[in-house]
Image (tube, grey):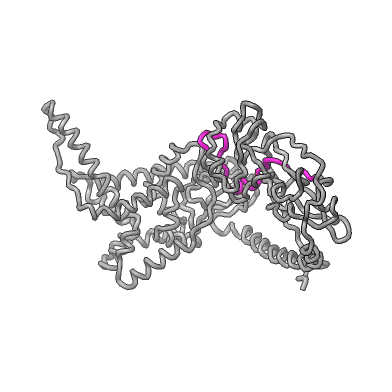
Amino acid sequence: MRSSALKHIRIIFSSILLVAFVFMFVDFRDVFPAKLHRWLLYIQFIPSFLKYTIAGVATATGFLVIIIITILTGRTYCSFLCPLGSLQDVISRVGGWFKRRYRKYGYKKPYTITRYFILALTVGIMLMGGTYVLSILDPYSTFGRFMTFFIKPVALFLNNLIANILSNFDIYAVYKVDVKFYELAVYTVPVVFLLLVGVLSFRYGRLYCNSICPVGTFLGLLSKISFLRMKFDEKGSCTRCGRCAVSCKSSCIDFLNKHIDTSRCVNCFNCLDSCSEGGLKYAPFFNLRTAKVKEEVKTDSSRRQFVAGAAVLMAGLPSLLRGQDQVVRSARASTVKEDRLYPVTPPGSVGIENFTSRCTACSLCITICPTKVLQPSITEYGITGMMQPRMDFKTGFCNYECTKCSEICPTGAIMPLMLEAKKQTQIGKAVFIRENCYVFTEHTACGACSEHCPTKAVHMIPFDDFLTIPEVNDTICIGCGACEYACPASPFKAIFVDGNSIHEAALKPEVKKLETGNDDFPF
């Protein structure tokens, strides 16, 4: 079955169920079949579970069916059968219409402590005989309260409006129905959860399912042992383009490391549909053994890298201590001016021409920038680009973990950029001027540029005696400007970032492994 077919089946099936559930709650003429009521309630986890365990009804085994389905296929309940999940998809889609320039998805770390604490609290209170917390957090019950308190009154109002209009033409096929409201205090919980679910789904997709909903957390635990799972193709067809992560409403795809958090994946199949290279597939778990072995090798390698780093640190400790006694002083002014060919535009702006043609100089990105590296330009883009933001690395640097400007740009001059992609977007290249460096001019230890470089594109190499001097690796430099900002040379910097007229892709930094004489552990 083609990947797009899986997504379409999910959309059609969940849409039909959502309409059925809405009609079930809104129906005020009692035309909804009672038999359909029973089937819809049978496939809802918490109602079925409570009915079976508390009331002792033997036919209420729907929760067991859902558990079996989860063990076989993963969290398909959350995408196919849960009305609140389908409602979140609708709200999320509406959010996409308001923010077409920026799909809110992308890999995010799980709120592990929060979701497991809520699950443990819910189970603990339930074991003590209390079901209120379970009922409050039950997705089906939450959906039902939305329909009862908010949607049904609207439906009744529209019915009465139509009845009034038709009565003017002596048509009485539609009759009025009394609209009754509840005490104001009763609306507290529905309003709170409407805001909570609405805001989270509008902005972050399925964050409520994966962080608050105890049913989602419980089924997520079961999905870790599911027979069918989403995974990356082991044949290497994935190009790490990031489209799968952008389309993942659960924010559980780490495309750079080719890892999918199965406990958060709700099997929406959006990622399959978005991947044109066929780098993802929905397949049995036993095909994951190769990937698991690779992960174990990676873990072992990381341990050796840690030991290697410790050994190098100890070896260089005497030089480091000697360097601590020396204070970098501007005894001599730098003389070589930075030859900057292009200004540096923010990550996500694609390039200078694309940026300047879309930017309206509203200064919103300048205001929100936490490091204040974005500054209004004067002549850097020409007269027509005055006041448009530029990266000024003398006032700050581009935070390696920040994408705020791409999230708030209203014109698309700075396009949305996932953090993983931003970390490999090369907005410029660092250029080293030896004649301005204190190590060269003052014959004193420095290395501030290398210490602040997040990718270690700027690294130190032997220079004279115990001294080391910077060297730049263009292939892994992203042009963040941390080196230029940290450089103490003045008035001209010993290292600066020259912008790329069109942004390029930097290679992922590699961590060197410790070379030992044999394969045995060095100790």
Please tell me which residue is depicted at 42% across the width and 49% down the height of the picture. 200
- Residue 35 lies, in percent from the top left, at 24, 51
- Name the image quarter holding residue 209: bottom left
Query: The magenta stretch spans which residues?
Result: 409-432
Residue 129 lies left or right of residue 487; in this view the side is left
Q: Nearer the viewer, residue 130 or 404?
A: 404
- Residue 399 lies, in percent from the top left, at 62, 49
Residue 220 appears in the figure: yes
Residue 250 drawn in magenta = no
Residue 515 appears in the figure: no
Residue 410 drawn in magenta = yes
- Residue 273 lies, in percent from the top left, at 52, 42
Q: Nearer the viewer, residue 190 or 519?
A: 190
Q: Nearer the viewer, residue 381 or 243?
A: 381
- Residue 397 lies, in percent from the top left, at 65, 47
Please tell me which residue is depicted at 30% across the width and 60% down the height of the picture. 47
Q: Nearer the viewer, residue 236 or 392?
A: 392
